[in-house]
Amino acid sequence: MTDQAAFAEFATALDTAVARARRAAAEARETSAKFRRETRQLADGLNSRTGQVRPDELTDDRMRRTATGFRTDHGLPVLDVPSADELLPPPTTPGPLRTTGSGRRIPPPSDDDEDFSQERIMR
């Protein structure tokens, strides 16, 4: 292989690698921007108390303290978000259970029962 051929092969491989790196960097910037945008929307919803939070979405207190410490140590902004107790709606108490003739307790029928007609037939 001549020097010119080797250089051309190297230049082609370098161009391919640079193009791949630029594409990966652009995808990473896009993913990061989307994540920041969604995080900002969640934070704004929590601060205005319009966001809905499920218990399984909450970060435990230990992790919150660790994250706050990391951000503070590295000079990053720390959002003042409400605690988990402030975010969750008060617990609801379940409705009363009905009792069948055999003494078995069953929950009241709900609207999401797909086979509601069977309950009437069985009685």
Image: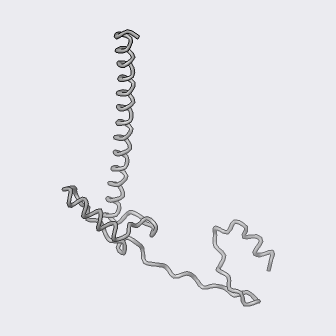
Vertical placement of 19 versus 111: above or below?
Answer: above
Residue at 35%, 36% (x, y): give it: 25
Nearer to me, 118 or 70: 70
**Image coords of residue 114 (percent x, y):** 69, 65
Quadrant position of residue 77: bottom left
Vertical placement of 68 versus 122: above or below?
Answer: above
| Applied colour scheme | one colour
> In which quadrant is the N terminus drawn?
top left
**Image coords of residue 73 (percent x, y):** 20, 60
Quadrant position of residue 33: top left
**Image coords of residue 109 (percent x, y):** 66, 76
- Give the side of residue 22 with respect to residue 101, left or right: left
> In which quadrant is the C terminus drawn?
bottom right
Quadrant position of residue 54: bottom left
- Give the side of residue 106 with respect to residue 71, left or right: right
Residue at 39%, 22% (x, y): give it: 13
Residue at 34%, 71% (x, y): give it: 61
Residue at 37%, 52% (x, y): give it: 38
